[in-house]
């Protein structure tokens, strides 16, 4: 299906990294975990061939968009991303999401299917239970600030430097609250979502039973090992998976 392209200048705030690259054959879009940003993927491009172009999602409330409020619901974020990604759909594309980023990648895949009949060549999903599984984690976003900070520290996913700099921490707290509210309020809606080939990065947060739910109704797919807060899987492993599935 032909997609009516927007100008890249209209959507450039949403993605960091893509440059004019005549050798690019595929774009890999990367979505962050709660409180994360584009920096978590900053080294991936140097380990991938020039035929794979990294596009790092740059969400409201962080980095160059720090003055914007973070979104607290997934649907408006996905709709905005679906608009913003259109100029980049002239090449085959793949999605990688970690934790909150997995939800974003999954629902963006479904939205692009609905709008354009397009699907990523690969959907890499890390550190999140299947969307059909109710979110049972502690409600973090409404906690008083001292308790919220303590819980975030316990999750061990935020760089320790953030906690050592009170001013930086104060800047980060509204974003982290917004991201955790986005995750907690997400509700899965049944629908057609044929998303293969998909890779699932399994870690100790995902019980085997819950992992199987990801795969229910889908063809059996490769499993790539990972860890909880940011996947131990390397960009070279992603490259191998992309190569074998293209």
Image (tube, helix red, strand yellow):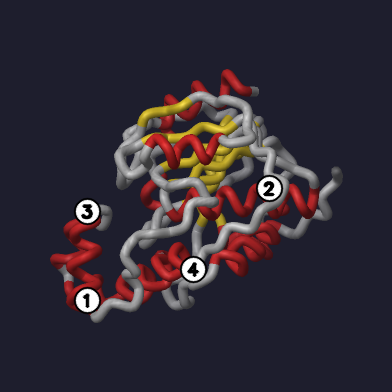
The residue beneath circle 3 is 156
User: Distance between the Cα atoms at labels 3 and 4?
Assistant: 22 Å
Q: Nearer the viewer, residue 194 or 132?
A: 132
Q: Residues within 10 Å of mark 1 (few under 14, many from 20)?
A: few
Looking at the image, the residue that sits furthest to the right is 2
Pointer 2 with pointer 3, Cβ within 8 A: no
Asked whether residue 65 is in view, the answer is no
Secondary structure of the residue carrying tag 4 is loop
Relative image position of residue 165 (x, y in whole percent): 17, 69
N-terminal of the pair, mark 2 or mark 3, is: 2
| Of labels 1 and 3, the one closer to you | 3
Q: Is residue 160 left or right of residue 14?
A: left
Q: Which of 90 and 226 is in front in this view?
A: 226
Q: How many marks?
A: 4
User: In the rendered image, which quarter is residue 74 located in?
Assistant: bottom right
Residue 88 tag number: 2
N-terminal of the pair, mark 4 or mark 2, is: 2
Q: In this view, does 143 lie to the left or right of 133?
A: left
The residue beneath circle 1 is 167
Residue 185 tag number: 4
Pointer 3 with pointer 4, Cβ within 8 A: no
Pointer 1 with pointer 3, Cβ within 8 A: no
In the displayed structure, 49 sits above or below 100; it is: above
Relative image position of residue 105 (x, y in whole percent): 56, 49
The residue at 50%/24% (across/down) is 222
Q: How crowded is mark 3: few (under 14 residues within 10 Å), some or many (20 or more)?
A: few
């Amino acid at each position: 299906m032909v997609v009516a392209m927007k100008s890249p200048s209209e959507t450039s705030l949403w993605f960091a990294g893509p440059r004019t690259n005549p050798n690019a054959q595929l774009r890999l879009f990367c979505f962050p975990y709660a409180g994360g940003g584009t920096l978590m993927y900053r080294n991936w491009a140097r380990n991938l061939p020039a035929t794979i172009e990294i596009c790092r999602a740059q969400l409201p409330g962080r980095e160059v968009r720090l003055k914007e409020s973070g979104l607290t619901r997934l649907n408006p974020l996905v709709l905005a991303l679906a608009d913003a990604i259109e100029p980049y759909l002239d090449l085959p594309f793949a999605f990688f999401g970690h934790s909150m980023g997995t939800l974003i990648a999954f629902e963006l895949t479904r939205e692009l299917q609905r709008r354009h009949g397009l699907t990523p060549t690969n959907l890499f999903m890390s550190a999140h239970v299947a969307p059909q599984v109710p979110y049972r984690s502690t409600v973090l976003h409404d906690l008083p600030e001292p308790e919220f900070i303590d819980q975030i520290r316990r999750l061990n996913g935020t760089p320790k430097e953030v906690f050592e700099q009170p001013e930086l921490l104060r800047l980060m707290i509204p974003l982290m609250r917004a991201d955790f509210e986005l995750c907690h309020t997400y509700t899965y809606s049944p629908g057609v979502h044929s998303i293969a080939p998909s890779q699932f990065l399994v870690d100790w947060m995902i019980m085997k039973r819950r992992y199987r739910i990801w795969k229910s109704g889908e063809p059996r797919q490769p499993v790539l090992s990972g860890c909880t807060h940011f996947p131990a899987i390397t960009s070279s492993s992603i490259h191998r998976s992309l190569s074998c599935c293209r």
